[in-house]
Image (cartoon, helix red, strand yellow):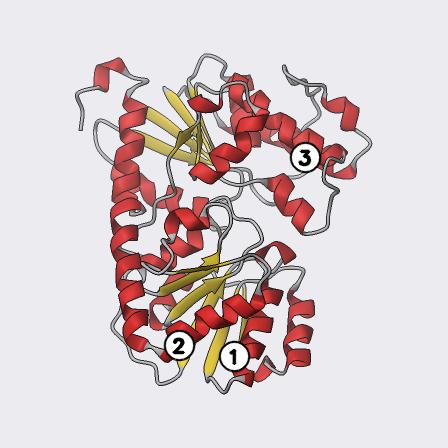
Amino acid sequence: MKLLQALFFPPEQPGGVSSMVPYMQERFSSSRWEMEIFWLPKRLRNKGREEVVFDTFDWTLYKDSEIVQKYIQTYRDYLWWVRMRVKKPYELIHAHHPIAGLALKQLFPDTPLIQTIHSSYERELILNGKIQENGPEHQFLVSLYHELEQKSDRLITVSQSFAEYMSSYVDHPDHIHVIPNGFDEKRFKPIPHENEIAQLVTVCRLVPAKGLDILLKACAELKSRGYDYVLHIIGDGPYRKELEELARQLGVYNETIFYGYTLHPEEFIPFFDIFVLPSRAESFGSVFAEAALSCLALIGSDVGGIPEQIDDGVNGLLVPVEDYIALSEALEKVISDPSYRYELSRSAWEKAKSEYSLTHVVNLLKKMYLEFDTSMRDVK
């Protein structure tokens, strides 16, 4: 089967898709499978010129928004790049971004399209203060779910929570499939180590939606109770200066290390002890699965797809959104009791190994792909 994996961002970008799709290629390197990856180069901008028309809604109702105009121009650019680069036919397209799926379906209408929606751009923009809830940008972005439903032969998302979120925007919510992201067991694996002082780590884009202000307040509370720790913040973003200033104001700057963007954090995440991320929204939370495969204890907020990964008190701890006191108490539990921390981390590793390993997810995807090729249904 000739299969195209269509991304939006280049594969070296951080995030769940980039942690999965490029590493799937070797699992499809056989005479029975041929898989290629396609994406829009970062430098390519303002090339597309053609008119954009959607079947299920009129996007021009929102044309006065700069965000909508930018989205539409990016869609035009993707169409332009596909026309330039994709020449040979494929038997199946699996897209991992709405722009990728809609553009490829427009140009290859007879090729089956599987569309995975990995996250909610509109919720991120709302939480980060970029758009207003129910404003024109919000209405435009949620309208895309219905368009994708109409254009896709199979619609997938990465958590049951996000499938429920999408259900109000589509005609047939019961047709949405849930397949989580998968992570290469060769890259994310435990490494035996001992730290005299508890090492906390978080990996994310530095934006308000990730709740790092709540984490810093929780760490200040920990410090006031006399607990020693080091907090490692891996990632960059527009909120970094505000977070650094907040760390100074709270008196935890000396205990906090801001790394900035790091291409391969999996190379040293296994040497930490506790992964913590109090997100305000999370469709799946790929970093939790990555940290679990590295055998870290997990602490996250009880929101979105995170509770589907963390069974509170069994393989990690869940805390209410925005509650820095509850977060500090959860951190205190795992810092003060190394044996409990180990039990949590071991359970997290076992669950991630069974449900979020790349081997497991690739097997789920292969089974789905074969439904679109009757000649290969007996292939394992």
Local packing at callout 1 (Cα closer than 10 Å; few below 14, some 14-19, many 20+) is many
Q: Position of residue 210 (x, y in %)?
A: 57, 57
Select label 1 or label 3 by which is in front: 1
Nearer to us in this view, 76 or 153: 153
**What is the distance, in whole Å, between disc 1 and disc 3 at their CAs?**
43 Å
Secondary structure of residue under mark 3: helix
Query: The residue under label 1 is which amino acid type?
Result: Leu
Query: The residue under label 3 is which amino acid type?
Result: Tyr
Nearer to us in this view, 190 or 317: 317
Are the two marked residues, 2 and 1, in contact with CB atoms closer than 8 angstroms? yes
Select label 3 or label 2 by which is in front: 2
Residue highlighted by disc 3 = 71
Are the two marked residues, 1 and 3, in contact with CB atoms closer than 8 angstroms? no
- The quadrant in which the N terminus is found is top left
Local packing at callout 2 (Cα closer than 10 Å; few below 14, some 14-19, many 20+) is many
Residue highlighted by disc 2 = 335
